[in-house]
Image (cartoon, rainbow, N blue to C red):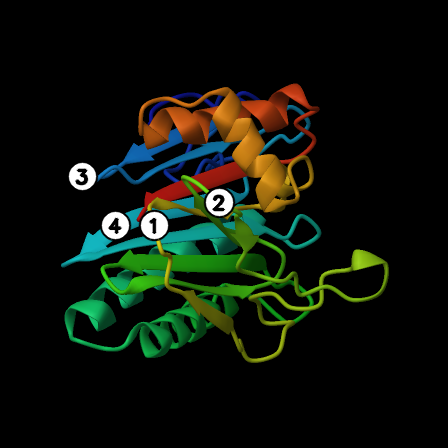
Amino acid sequence: MAETEGCVLCGGNVAPDGYCWHCGGAQPAYRARLEVTMDGGAAGVSDRGLRRGVNADAMVVTTAGSWTIGVVCDGVSMSPRPERAAQVAAVTGAAVLAGRLEAGAIPEDALEEAAVRAGRVVVALAASPDAAPACTYVAGVAGPAGIWASWIGDSRAYWLPAEGVGMALSEDDTGEYDALAAWLGADADEPTPTIRSFRPSGPGRLLLCTDGLSRYLPTADELRAALDRRRSDNNLLEEARSLVDHALQAGGHDNVTAILIPF
């Protein structure tokens, strides 16, 4: 949204982060639908959903040499300014990953440092531990040697092969009653990402997504089936759109974001 557009609440000026300079109100259309593509085919789609006033998901897709990098973050809705936490975490995580991989770091080290650095920038947003923006975090990288994923929270990573059985690469950080047990923020512990690697035997896609998608398609088999119904000749943007639109048609109760990275 351009800074010159008027606030829907008071008519005042809107800042680049989607909030009014005058009344502080969030603008419903800000980041309502985002799509990104990269050379090589990686693509992502993020949608506000049908029940949320603001899109508090964030995504970044980039490359570093032979690596393709994706980061997806989901702002914790009970925290203040969750969309800001998600945005700075995704941008920082992707930038650190790109820099470390270009410098020759092994993926495990790059993923760990990226998550820690992303956590620190989210902590810096807090006015106090009781007013702490927060988000979940999942990152993935794909290169000639395989795919790697790291996560904190309940945003997920999946391997979806062109043929054969898919698999979830991540496991939700949740506790009793599926309550979130790990996140980035000043009211959380020091980030300790879980990292998993996989060396596929054939082509496929690395999927990174928020729970706005996984609540409707929780398993790799269900995700594969949804993609197979709308197979689009390796157009990953169309495939990402189809996953996001499936979530919207199923109810769209939350923000929904999906990145697909080819392998």
Can you tell which of label 1 and label 4 is closer to the viewer? 1
Q: Are marks 1 and 4 in contact (CB under 8 Å)?
A: no
Up/down of 208 relative to 50, above or below: below
**Amino acid type indicated by mark 2:** Gly
Q: Which residue is depicted at the point 57% across and 57% down?
A: 135
Return the residue nearer the eye: 146 or 80: 146
Sequence-wise, the earlier of marks 3 and 1 is 3
Q: Which residue is mark 4?
A: 62
Q: Nearer the viewer, mark 3 or mark 1?
A: 1
Q: Nearer the viewer, mark 4 or mark 2?
A: 2
Please tell me whether residue 210 is drawn above or below residue 254 in the rendered image: below
Say which label, 1 or 4, has the lower sequence index.
4
Residue holding disc 3: 39
Q: State which quarter of the image contains the N terminus.
A: top left
Residue 54 image point, x, y percent: 57, 34
Q: Residues within 10 Å of mark 4 (few under 14, many from 20)?
A: many
- Lateral position of residue 132 relative to residue 45, left or right: right
- Of marks 4 and 3, which one's residue comes earlier in the chain? 3
Dot 4 falls on a residue whose secondary structure is strand
How many other residues sit within 10 Å of disc 2, few (<14), some (14-19) or many (≥20)? few
> Does any portion of residue 56 appear in the rendered image?
yes
Disc 4/disc 2 C-alpha distance (Å): 28 Å
Reading the image, the residue beneath label 1 is 202
Q: Are marks 2 and 1 in contact (CB under 8 Å)?
A: yes
Q: Residue 124 placed where, x, y %?
A: 47, 69
Residue at numbered disc 2: 164
Give amino acid for label 3. Answer: Asp
Mark 2 or mark 1, earlier in chain: 2
Nearer the camera: disc 3 or disc 2: 2
